[in-house]
Image: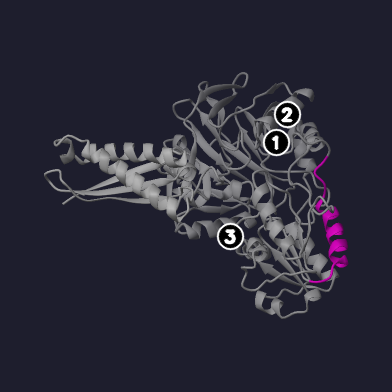
Amino acid sequence: MQGHKPGMKKNTEDEFVFLPLGGSGEIGMNLNAYGYGPADDRTWIIMDIGVTFGDAATPGIDVIMPDPTYLESENVIGIVLTHAHEDHIGAIGHLWRRLKAPVYCTPFTAYLVKDKLREAGLIDDVDLNIVPMKGAFDLGPFHLRLVTLTHSIPEPNGVVIETPLGVVMHTGDWKIDPDPLVGEATDAAALTEIGHRGVLAMVCDSTNALVEGTAGSEADVRKELIKLVGELSGKVVVACFASNVARVSSVIEAARAAGRHVCFVGRSMKRIVAAAQSVGILKEDAIFVGEEEAAHLPDDYVLYLATGSQGEARAALAKIAHGAHPAVKLSSGDTVIFSSRVIPGNEIPIKDVQNHLVERGVKVITDRDRDIHVSGHPCKDELRQMYQWVRPKIAIPVHGEARHLKEHAALAKSLQVEQTIVPRNGDMIRLAPGAAEIIDETPNGRLHLDGSRLVQADDSALRERRKIAVVGHITVTVAVSGKGALVSGPALCVRGLPDLGDADEGEAIEALEEAADDAFSALKPVQKQDPNQIEEALERAVRRQAERIWGKRPLVDAMVLTV
């Protein structure tokens, strides 16, 4: 392994620090940073810059990402991407303008990053550096070397970060797959060499730290998919993560063996396949057909490879399940294979899609029925092997919820790792000199992509949206003369409150109007000339009356028009 830059020397004030801003205490939204130098003048590199996705708790928010505010005023000299999953690259187009640093990644990842930069209007602004597999490069005081690992996407890399104060092994996402089908197997020789030379710390994936054994091999999944597809008649749809090119390749091979033509369905599936083909990763001897052509083939001669295995409402599979897809129609005798796992939090939408398929007479097969999925993250036996190879002095678990990180730390201690630190997002950890310790808590948080704007997670609009979702909303409008006389109204608009039926609904509106009218009448003459006092009185009165009617205290907005 090469050393750090010639002439680079340790300064007595230099520190080597690690700062997670996303991905610690949660799965997804990874953003980790390494700093070197004196406390008031550090040089930084960022390792991955990903997103997570909104849920019922964030109405109207599809994409969530780490808040990089702390790093915006720091000297960031590079953004290094370990692989192309959304939770590692998805924020690049949204956050790059805040950081404005060169980006480094391997060819497959670069293909997908270019798409994101193009969508963000940044393709001509970003210095995108393509690094070959097993490549090495220098960034300021950091010497970086890529180590080939295996995962559920092409070109996953661990990154060895060497500085004058010590070496860190940053694993990114990984597993140990002896036969990954796409790309090389884990570079055990390189990992062993790194361990022999001495590793200060390992920052490591914790996703499956609660699971004994190993994650399993893509080669075994391929065998089972070939067998399963060969048993089926009628139309077949296989839903999987588009980014798992090895799985895509296996589905294509299963279709070929069964004499079926493959039809890609879903934008992200087509995009990933194009990326894999562009860099020579996917070279299958199969017949691909478009959606219109597939619709005219005999049922037994087509296999659809679709996105939407997590029940995403706008993905291809959800449209198929609800009968809304323009080209793919399923019915009794057809089969949908879920070659994927259920990501926690997606249970309800996945069940919804599966139930709609079953109602159409479609047979649904999941990994509970057949061995058609393996994880892309290391289980305990794989973690043990990695620690035996790398032998770090310090273990820092990341990429996991609190229970995953603590279990990982306990496993590292059982393997005689000298020190473990379980980080939270925002913890500044000094790795060297001296014993590793948390030395500061930096500003951190989440940014929400709300439409086309990035807003803080505590943005007032989201708070109001949540409240409206729970209690409903009423608008009351009055027109008042300059002398404080009621010209018209009160007029009400009720949204999101239980339907009372036509008769009771009318009575409810009348009761709300009467409450608003009484509240206005009770105001003193001078108050009737103050729109703010009128609004406050109307909102209070309508809210109280609504609680009597519905048992809820809705959000009430009063509008006063001066005429």
Q: Secondary structure at mark 3?
A: loop
Q: Earlier in the sequence, mark 3 or mark 1?
A: 1
Q: Nearer the viewer, mark 3 or mark 2?
A: 3
Give the side of residue 171 with respect to residue 469, left or right.
right
Which residue is at the front of the view, 370 or 91? 370
**Residue behind mark 1:** 206
Q: Is 1 placed above or below 402 here?
A: below
Res. 416 image quadrant: top right
Give the total of numbered labels. 3
**Tag of residue 314:** 3
Q: Find out whether residue 86 is within the magenta segment.
A: no
* Disc 3 to disc 1, C-alpha distance: 30 Å
Tag 1: residue type?
A: Ser
Local crowd at mark 2 within 10 Å, few (<14), some, or many (≥20)? some
Local crowd at mark 3 within 10 Å, few (<14), some, or many (≥20)? few
**Residue behind mark 2:** 407
* Residue 512: % across, % down: 35, 45
Write down the region rendered in magenta. 214-234
Tag 2: residue type?
A: Glu
Which residue is at the front of the view, 205 or 268? 268
**Tag of residue 563:** none
* Residue 43: % across, % down: 49, 34
Q: Are marks 2 and 1 in contact (CB under 8 Å)?
A: yes
Predominant SS of the magenta segment: helix
Local crowd at mark 1 within 10 Å, few (<14), some, or many (≥20)? many
Give the side of residue 535 with respect to residue 293, left or right.
left
Q: Find out whether residue 233 is within the magenta segment.
A: yes
Res. 305 image quadrant: bottom right
